[in-house]
Image (cartoon, grey):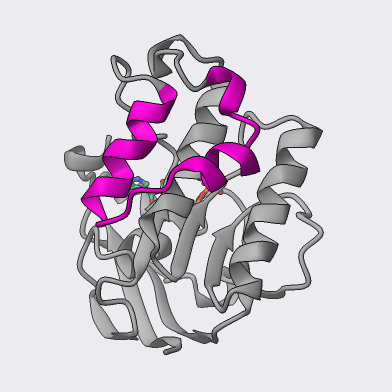
């Protein structure tokens, strides 16, 4: 299975953001999305993850295969670290959370309520969540925000292991993760529409 995006057009608040986007992510490989602030990376990732409809074009290989991590960590504040991971594992029909705890050095924090974690610890837990989904395609929007250098290395190691097991990753990031990945710059695909038109999409504010 390969993730294939073909001639995709995406919009925010009804305003076209990107069009003519085509790329592939094959098993065992990752693709880094680049582009300046506001270029449309988040919009593209949300569309590929199925969180909003495309304006036009095709996305193949994305049915029930994607684990998405956006800007929000999606944690349950009143559950412990281990309970959060167990919850997500069960949602995806899995049970073993130990590899995810180990990969992000969360074992010493396993009984802490997620709401009491630091920003970087929350982000580590949010990324550990990907491992318990068992999903082959990780779609990640600025995954290293709040992470220190050690945690960035944990994340890079987790992605490398995921790819080594035949997984895929599509990652929007402004930093160099040290991955052996192709890059895709969205800049040439920006729509000509004026984003200052005042259109908004309150559902995502
Ligand atoms: N809720 C919204 N309603 C309308 N327009 C929006 C909304 N959210 C974002 N936009 C606009 O859509 C365009 C694309 O934004 P998007 O978040 O996809 O960019 P990005 O490349 O991810 O940026 P960054 O690097 O800053 O995260 C921007 O012009 C932005 O102002």
Q: Quadrant of residue 143?
A: top right
Residue 27's place in the image compared with 80, above or below, is below
Q: Quadrant of the N terminus?
A: bottom left
Query: Residue 49 in the image: x percent, y percent?
Result: 32, 64
**x, y percent for residue 101:** 55, 37
Q: Which residues are magenta?
A: 81-109
Q: Which residue is drawn at the image coordinates 25% and 77% (left, top)?
A: 63
Give the mark count: 0
Among the 4 quarters of the image, the one containing residue 12 = bottom left
* Residue 92, above or below 72: below
Q: What secondary structure is the stretch in magenta mostly built from?
A: helix
Toward the viewer: 14 or 1?
A: 1
Left or right placement of residue 152 versus residue 110 in this view? right
Residue at 34%, 84% in the rendered image: 61
Residue placed most toward the observer, 181 or 86: 86
Q: Name the foreground residue: 10 vs 148.
A: 148
**Residue 14: image location, x then y, percent:** 21, 59
Any part of residue 16 in sight: no
Using residue 145 as the reference point, say whether residue 48 is left or right of it: left
For residue 86: magenta?
yes
């Amino acid at each position: 299975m390969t993730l294939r995006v073909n001639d995709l057009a995406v919009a925010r608040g009804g305003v076209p953001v990107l069009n003519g986007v085509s790329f592939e992510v094959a098993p065992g490989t990752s693709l880094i999305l680049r582009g300046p602030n506001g270029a449309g990376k988040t919009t593209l990732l949300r569309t590929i993850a199925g969180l909003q409809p495309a304006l036009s074009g095709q996305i193949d290989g994305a049915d029930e295969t994607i684990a998405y991590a956006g800007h929000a960590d999606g944690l349950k504040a009143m559950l412990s670290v281990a309970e959060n991971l167990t919850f997500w594992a069960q949602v995806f029909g899995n049970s073993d959370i130990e590899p995810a705890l180990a990969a992000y050095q969360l074992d010493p924090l396993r009984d802490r309520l997620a709401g009491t974690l630091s920003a970087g610890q929350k982000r580590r837990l949010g990324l550990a969540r990907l491992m318990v989904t068992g999903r082959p395609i990780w779609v990640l929007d600025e995954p290293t925000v709040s992470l220190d250098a050690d945690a960035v290395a944990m994340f890079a190691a987790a992605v490398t292991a995921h790819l080594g097991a035949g997984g895929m990753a599509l990652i929007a990031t402004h930093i160099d993760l040290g991955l052996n990945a192709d890059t895709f710059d969205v800049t040439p695909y920006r729509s000509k529409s004026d984003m200052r038109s005042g259109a908004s999409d309150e559902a995502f504010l």
